[in-house]
Amino acid sequence: MRGRGRGPAPLPGRASRVWRTLGAAFVLLVFVPPLVLLVSGSLTQPGLPPAPTPRLVPDPLTTVGYEQAVELGGLLRASVNSVLVAVVAVPLSVLVASLAGFAMARLAPRTTAAVVAASLVALMVPATALLVPRFAVFRVLGLTDTLVPLVAPALVGTSPLYVLVYYLAFRALPAELYDACLVEDLSPVRTWWRMALPMVRPVTAGLTALTFVLTWSNFLDPLVYVYDRDLFTLPLALRSLSVLDPTNFPVFLAGAVVATVPALVVFVLAQRRLLHTPDRNGR
C-alpha cells in the first residue's frame, strides 16, 4: 500500500544541486585564474621589464600602478562618468523594457505576433548600421560631446531582446493571477507593479546585471559621441592607458581591475535572485 504522505522524489533536487555545483566549478576554473593574474599583474612595479612568465606574487609588491593609472588615465573622473551613465541608464532601461513586455503579454494574440516579429527583425539589424543615423540625429540636436547619447537608448529599453524576455516571463504567469487583479479592479499599471513585476524578480535581476555590464563596458558609443576628456568613461580611459610603454603595462592592468570590480560586485548581488523562484506572493 502506498503512503499518501510521501513527497516528491529527491532525485530532481539532488540533480539540480549537482548541476549547480558543476556549473560553479566550471565558472571558477574559467574565470578565476585570469582574474588572479590580472590582480597580480596590477601589483607589479611599473617600469620594470616584463617577466618571461606570469607571477602570482610579484616582487616587489606595490600599488604604484593604481596611483599612476588614476593620474595618467584620469580613472577617477572616468569612473564618476561611468557611474552616472549606469545609474540613469540601467534602471530606466529595465523599467521601459518591463512595461513594454507587460503590454505585449496583455495584447491580442494577432497584435502580439506582429510586435514579436517586428522585435525579432529589429534584433537582426547590426548595431553599427545605426551609428550614422543616430549620430546625425544627436548632432542636429546638439547633444554630441555629452553623456546624453549614452543614456538615450534606455528610453526604448536598450534592446528588443530585453522586451522579449520580459514578454515571455509575463506570459508564463498563471492567467488566474491576472483574473484576480481584474476582480480587484486594479489598473494595468498597478497590475504590472503590484503583481506581475514582483513575480519575475529573477528576470529583473538578470537583465539588470546584463544591462549594467553592457553599459559599463560600452566602448563604441563613447568613442563616437564623446570628445572632451573630462567626459570620458572608463573604457575610453583604459584605451588611453593601453598605449603606454610595455614596461608600464601594470598601469593598464590596474585600470582594468578598477573597471572589472564593479561588474563583479553587481553579478554577486544579482546571483541570488537569478537562482530564486518567487512564490505566488512574489517573495
Image (spheres, helix red, strand yellow):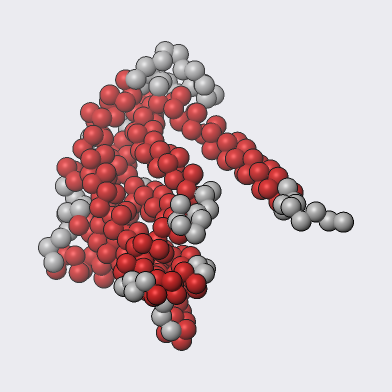
Q: Residue at x 32, y 61 (%)?
A: 95
Q: For the view shown, which residue lies furthest in the left direction?
A: 142
- Horizontal relation, residue 261 to residue 131: left or right: right
Report x, y in % for residue 129. 35, 69
Above or below 171: residue 93: above
Q: Residue at x 40, y 71 (%)?
A: 181
Q: Residue at x 50, y 73 (%)?
A: 175
Report x, y in % for residue 210. 42, 52
Q: Residue at x 48, y 65 (%)?
A: 169
- Please state which of residues 121 and 242 is positioned toward the viewer in this rendering: 121
Report x, y in % for residue 186. 33, 71
Report x, y in % for residue 277. 53, 53
Above or below 194: residue 19: above
Q: Quadrant of residue 261?
A: top left
- Horizontal relation, residue 80 to residue 170: left or right: left
Q: For the view shown, which residue lies furthest in the top direction?
A: 60
- Please state which of residues 194 and 107 is positioned toward the viewer in this rendering: 194
- Horizontal relation, residue 16 to residue 125: left or right: right
